[in-house]
Image: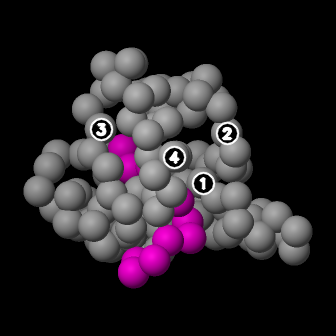
Amino acid sequence: MDDDPGILALVREALKEEGHEVFIALNGREGLEIFQRHSIQLVLTDIFMPELDGLGAMREILALAPQTRFIAFTGEGKEVGMDTFALNTAVRTGAHAVLEKPFGVNELVHQVETVLRG
């Protein structure tokens, strides 16, 4: 889930090349709806999005399926340290890994594989 189409395209292509099925959502509300229709093991989410942010989506998904794994990311608020606070909050909420934008394809793929191995 991310409100940035560029990030979504990067994630989709990188993970499809690794053989993963990928569903795309532009916000947390849309992501929650997709989650409820499909069997999803891992959710990648931006923390700051319109309608329902990543932390809210994580909480709602975990209430439905506590075994779900998450990778949260953000690039917002670097100048005031808000990104570090947001990423730490994501870990406390249930994220298994966090990434700071911009992140590279190799870093993304590595984190996905690590989290899926559990």
For the residues bearing labels 1 and 4, Cβ distance under 8 angstroms: no
For the residues bearing labels 2 and 1, Cβ distance under 8 angstroms: yes
Left or right? Give the position of 11 relative to 73. left
Q: Quadrant of residue 52?
A: bottom left
User: If you read the primary sequence from the N terminus, does the residue marked by circle 4 or circle 2 appear first?
Assistant: 4
- Distance from label 3 to label 4 (Cα)? 15 Å
Query: Mark 3, mark 4: which one is toward the viewer?
Result: 4
Q: Work out which quarter of the rendered image holds the C terminus and state it.
A: top left
User: If you read the primary sequence from the N terminus, does the residue marked by circle 2 or circle 1 appear first?
Assistant: 1
Residue farthest toward the right in the current orientation of the protein: 79
Residue that badge 2 annotates: 103
Residue that badge 3 annotates: 22
Q: Which residues are magenta?
A: 42-52
Query: Mark 1, mark 4: which one is toward the viewer?
Result: 4
- Distance from label 3 to label 1 (Cα)? 17 Å
Q: Say which amino acid is labelled 1.
A: Phe
Query: Mark 2, mark 1: which one is toward the viewer?
Result: 2
Bin the neighbour count of mark 4 within 10 Å (Cα to Cα): few under 14, some 14-19, many 20 and up.
few
Left or right? Give the position of 97 relative to 100. left
Element under label 2? loop
Q: Which mark is residue 6?
A: 4
- Distance from label 2 to label 3 (Cα)? 18 Å
